[in-house]
Image: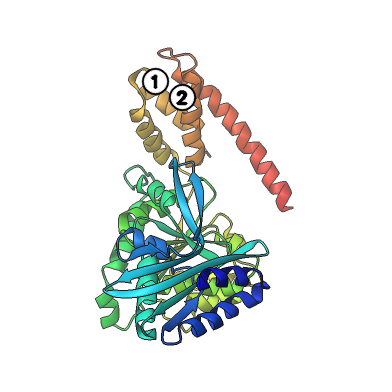
Amino acid sequence: MKIQQLITEALNLPNNAIAYHISQELAAIYPHKGLVEGSDPTFNLEKFATVNLCNLQDNIFIHNQITTNWDGMEEEIYNHTENASFEVTWQGYKLDILLMSWQEGYCKTRYYWILADNKEIAEKFFVDVCDWNSEIRDEVLVFEDGYWEKNQDLFQSIKGATFDNLILQGNLKQDIQDDLNTFFASRETYAAYGVPWKRGILFIGSPGNGKTHTVKALINQMQQPCLYVKSFKSEYDTDSENIRKVFKQARQSAPCILVLEDIDSLLTDENRSFFLNELDGFALNEGIVTIATTNHPERLDSAISDRPSRFDRKYHFELPDIEVRQAYIALWNQKLKTVMQLSYEAINHIVTLTDGFSFAYLKELFLSSMIRWMGTLETGVMEKIMLSQVAVLREQMSSTTITSEASEN
């Protein structure tokens, strides 16, 4: 009952007194035990236990507060421990774990106390749990709001992206694949010649021309851990602190791919210098491939866009020319049901009319036309539908360009 009373007493204290009070009381209750405590998010005891790396048994003498939640996507319930005490069996050792949480502003602090026969055992268990949770397995590690979170859904969406269903200008597709394949296969060669084993790649081009698809296809093909940064902004930490977290995790996960999509929106006058120092300062960043994308290269500082040691190679994603549009439209046409397919002459006509279309607009041309065709289900009308959609999309492109120019001015 002492633990239950301790939890109740602690939650009635001011937030900044809870952790110290519990630590002090546990030391008094268990004077001969080794104690490790903290709030590191990688110490996820329950996930560690789900793969049978340790065995959890509820402390039957106290009320364990465990919330029940609903996952609508997976259509299943899942539990989350708020305040609970567990007896843990791990590698023949017995440990007692106390997990607690309390609200601080808009955030929730989650804290743990690990009690073992000695501190060495408690520390080894802590390291084992954190190491296992830090590994990236069939998921993407996403950084947002100041912390990392594993995202299995994003990983699954990436698995559908390949270079087989991607058309790019000239040799661009093959050059990019060769670049990363060579890098990840050449660690010993880099070391033998004293070349830092790191790589920075910048994808440049207007929206809708294959940058994101290429990033996904690379991640899928390279089979390396992927870390994706949504923002360096968070409520409680500065950009500099968050940038430090990003590169610290990337170094721990290396060899890996670190993705900075729309890098021009991630960087500001205030955080740019710190970012550059982490990217190309004293730290080695060994084994990290940093892939950044931008729709607006003119917004990037020259220290990023022009200095090779930061982004060694720039790949430009241009609007598809007539030959690329021919290949792209022909590929899409092959995927259509026979009653929807265009004739050779119709393909050439559409190719000519879509000058200036990005890959995204070409894709939308097919999708919107297919939807309209399904309203008729008539054979031989697809070309007519697509011609009308070309006009609609071109007008949309014009209005989007005018709006974009107005907002920039």
Left or right for 196, reference 203: left
Residue 54 picture quarter:
bottom left
Say which element carries label 1: helix
User: Which percent across, then down, holds residue 315?
Assistant: 44, 59
Q: Which of 374 and 202 is in front in this view?
A: 374
- Give the amino acid type for the residue marked by disc 1 in the picture: Met
- Give the amino acid type for the residue marked by disc 2 in the picture: Met
Say which element carries label 2: helix
Cα gap from disc 2 to disc 1, whole angstroms = 8 Å
Residue 8 picture quarter:
bottom right
Q: Residues within 10 Å of mark 1 (few under 14, many from 20)?
A: many
- Residue topped by disc 2: 370
User: Which percent across, then down, holds residue 231?
Assistant: 57, 61
Vertical placement of residue 291 versus 359, above or below: below
At 41% from the left edge and 27% from the top edge, which residue is drawn?
347
- Residue topped by disc 1: 340
Vertical placement of residue 404 versus 348, above or below: below
